[in-house]
Image: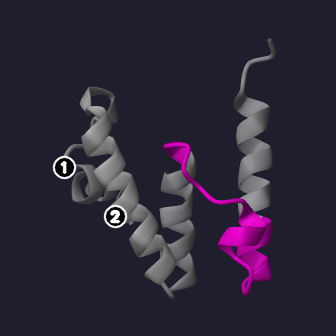
Amino acid sequence: MDLDGLLIHYFGTAELAGLDDPALADGSAALLLDFGLEREPGRKFALWALLDAIGRAPFPADAFPDHPELKRAAEDYLSASERLLPDD
């Protein structure tokens, strides 16, 4: 999956910084819907990662209850992303 393609598909632009709140909400709602309907594991994980990037991802245990390998991958992703945050 191509990140820019996903952003354009759901938000109409690859630059989220310029979106107003209604456009961000509409794109997020469509993304959440497609995430819930997606059955292919790799695509589902990619949609979840995009949801995480915009602050809308469900917890890994809720997102992947029937796929322990995806749940673990999501937990690892979150752990790695937290290590990238600057210390306060």
Estimate the x, y position of residue 25 in percent, counting from the top left: 35, 47
In this rendering, does residue 45 appear at all?
yes
Secondary structure of the residue carrying tag 1 is loop
Task: Please name which of the two marks, 1 or 2, marks the residue nearer to the observer.
Answer: 2
In front of the other: 24 or 81: 24
Instruction: Give the residue at x 72% y 70%.
Output: 62
The residue under label 2 is which amino acid type? Ala
- Residue 17 to residue 56: above or below: above
Q: Which residues are magenta?
A: 53-72
Q: Is residue 16 left or right of residue 80?
A: left
72 w.r.t. 16: above or below: below
Instruction: Give yes or no for contact between labels 1 and 2 (Cβ–Cβ under 8 Å).
Output: no
Relative to 60, is 20 on the left or the right?
Answer: left
Percent position of residue 21, x then y = 32, 35
Residue at image position (24%, 59%) is: 9
Farthest-out residue, left:
12
- When asked about the image quadrant of residue 20, the answer is top left
Q: As rendered, which of 77 and 48 lies closer to the eye? A: 48
Can residue 7 be seen in this snapshot?
A: no
Q: Residue furthest top?
A: 88
Tag count: 2
Q: Is residue 67 above or below residue 49?
A: below
Residue bearing mark 1: 12
At 50% from the left edge and 86% from the top edge, which residue is drawn? 40
User: Residue at point 27% right, 41% down?
Assistant: 22
> Residue 26: x and y, percent?
29, 53
**Quarter that holds the N terminus:** bottom left
Cα separation between marks 1 and 2: 12 Å
